[in-house]
Each structure stands twice: as C-alpha cells, then as structure tokens.
Image (cartoon, helix red, strand yellow):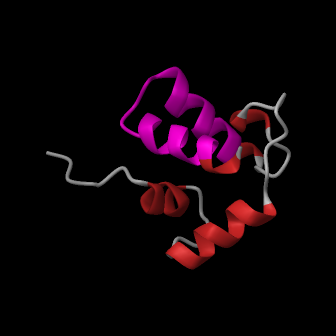
Amino acid sequence: METHKHDLRNLFRQLGLAAEDAQIDAFVEKHRLAPDIALINAPFWNPSQAKFLKQAMADDSDWAEAVDELAVRLS
C-alpha cells in the first residue's frame, strides 16, 4: 500500500526541486507561465521533469491534483 502524499511539496521533491514553502514560493515568483503556454511546455523544465508532468496529467495519476495546483500558482 502506497502511503506517499501527493501534495505540492512532494511534487517539487519528485521533480528534484527544493521543496520548503519559501523555496516553492521563490520558484513560483521566478517562473511564470505565459497565458498561451501549458505547464508541460514551459521552458524552465528539463526533459525528465517535463516528461513526468506530462505523464502525470495524461494518466490522471495521483500527482494530477498537485500538478494542477502548480499550474494555477504559476499562472
């Protein structure tokens, strides 16, 4: 049984990013999405991060809610 919590902090960890609240806030301030750019196509992801985000959304995985939250925060 999986007990991993699929929240924003753990999404940042999964993406290999610093995951404390202040670090997440700083990332969001620095990386904004243009209105016509989807989260998975943002230029600041490396290929493996973009692949993970795309797969999470395509599969409607347990990560999808956290990915949606990140997209909203970056918009």
Residue plotted at (54% across, 60% down): 12
Quarter that holds the N terminus = top left
Q: Position of residue 8 (x, y in %)?
A: 46, 56
Residue depicted at x 70% and y 35% = 40
Q: In this orientation, which residue lies closer to the viewer: 5 or 2?
A: 5
In the rendered image, residue 70, in percent from the top left (x then y), is placed at 58, 48
Q: From the viewer's side, name the closer residue of 4 and 25.
A: 25
Q: Is residue 60 magenta?
A: yes
Query: Residue 13 placed where, x, y %?
Result: 51, 63
Q: Is 62 displayed left or right of 18 in the figure?
A: left
x and y, in percent, of residue 43 in the image: 86, 45
Residue 72 falls in image quadrant: top right
Q: Is residue 16 above or below residue 58?
A: below
Snapshot quadrant of residue 26? bottom right
Left or right: 72 as drawn, with respect to 20: right
**Magenta-drawn segment:** 49-72
Q: Nearer the viewer, residue 54 or 69?
A: 69
Q: Main secondary structure of the magenta part?
A: helix
Q: Which residue shows up at 53% across the image and 28% down it?
A: 57
Q: Farthest residue toward the left?
A: 1
- The image quarter containing residue 25 is bottom right
Look at the picture and state if 72 lies above or below 38: below
For the C terminus, which image quadrant?
top right
Does residue 24 lie above or below 48 as drawn?
below
